[in-house]
Amino acid sequence: MLLSNGNIIPDIGLGTWKSSSGKVKDAVIYAVKNGYRHIDCAHVYGNEKEIGEAFTELFDNNVVKREDLFITSKVWNTKHRSEDVYGALQTTLKNLNLDYLDLYLIHWPIAFQSGENNFPKDENNNMIHTDTHYIDTWYGMENVYKKKLVKAIGVSNFNIKQIHYILSFASIPISVLQIECHFHLTQERLVKFAHDNRIVVTAYSPLGSPDRPWGKSDEPNLLEIGIIKNLAEKYNKSPAQILIKFINKLGLVVIPKSVTPSRISENIDILNFDISEEDMETLLDISHTNTWRACVPLSLNKDHVFYPFV
């Protein structure tokens, strides 16, 4: 998909959230060797050094060149002060063995206490939040963009009001909004607002993140929904492929996560079939009846003025 700055972001990428050490390096290498050109990372995932080893191996062995890949990372909540963004990016670039990123995102609109502890807590074990404004963080993002350390900047997990506020001050446009988006959470109003403002939307957890550590047995399993399984049989595809294709046909970039080779190959293999308009209408009719959110971090204070979810 075309970004507002003229660069291209591949429609399908490999997510690396929850990809554990000892597995993520091989997953990235396998993904790139099997057609992926978009890798989504974040400092807080704790696996960027191993991903950096994968990149070095891929480049040194001439599997791909650096310019062949679109690599994203995110500034974490403890680095929201404008003056902290540059250092945070330098750490990420060092970990990933890169000179620049294709995309750098503000991971969440809420700031934590500045420092090296990703999850600073007080004596009562409560997360220490601050009132650092995300617009201050955005100015730090513009600074690293102007230094040509990143090719595009954007936000993740922001709502319409927050995006609109940044747009009213920004000298560098928001290129990408990354949000949770799947069959039970299409977020169409937010997506439309982004598209109307020339912001590409990337969908994380398109399969509902069934392996999230806080998941409960009574929560939806998108891979087991009847209509999804029926369409998988109709199109001779897997339920995961139907879910990914559904979101991609809504005009979104999709970044499914896996470290399993067969699933990595399966998740990108959605370009050789299409879901009919009639079936898309059926899927949308059903999806509109649900607003289930899988990813609500317990570390975020719901009473914070910048909490993004209603």
Image (spheres, helix red, strand yellow):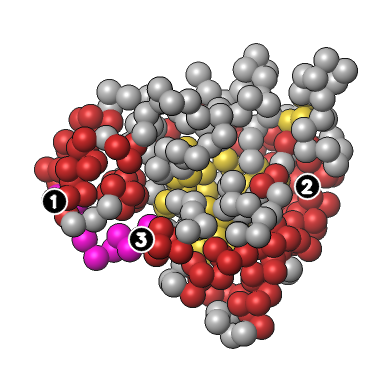
Q: Is residue 236 magenta?
A: no
Q: Position of residue 75 (x, y in %)?
A: 70, 46
Residue range of the region highlighted in magenta in the rendering: 266-276
Q: Position of residue 108 (x, y in %)?
A: 64, 35
Which residue in the structure is indicated by mark 1?
234
| Residue kind at label 3, given as amino acid type | Glu
Q: Residue at x 66, y 83 (%)?
A: 60
Residue 68: assigned label: none
Q: Residue at x 78, y 47 (%)?
A: 85
10 Å neighbourhood of mark 2: few (<14), some, or many (≥20)? many
Q: Position of residue 153 (x, y in %)?
A: 62, 51
Q: Secondary structure at mark 2?
A: helix
* Real-space CA distance between mark 3 and mark 2, rounded to the nearest whole angstrom: 36 Å
When asked about the image quadrant of residue 301, the answer is top right
Depth check: 60 or 19 in front? Answer: 19
* Real-space CA distance between mark 3 and mark 1, rounded to the nearest whole angstrom: 17 Å
Which residue in the structure is indicated by mark 2?
85
Q: Position of residue 218 (x, y in %)?
A: 40, 22
Which residue in the structure is indicated by mark 3?
266
Location of residue 21 with respect to 108 vertically, above or below: below
When asked about the image quadrant of residue 222, the answer is top left
Q: Is residue 307 left or right of residue 309?
A: right
* Total numbered labels: 3
Location of residue 181 with respect to 15 vertically, above or below: above
Q: Looking at the image, is mark 2 or mark 1 earlier in the sequence?
A: 2
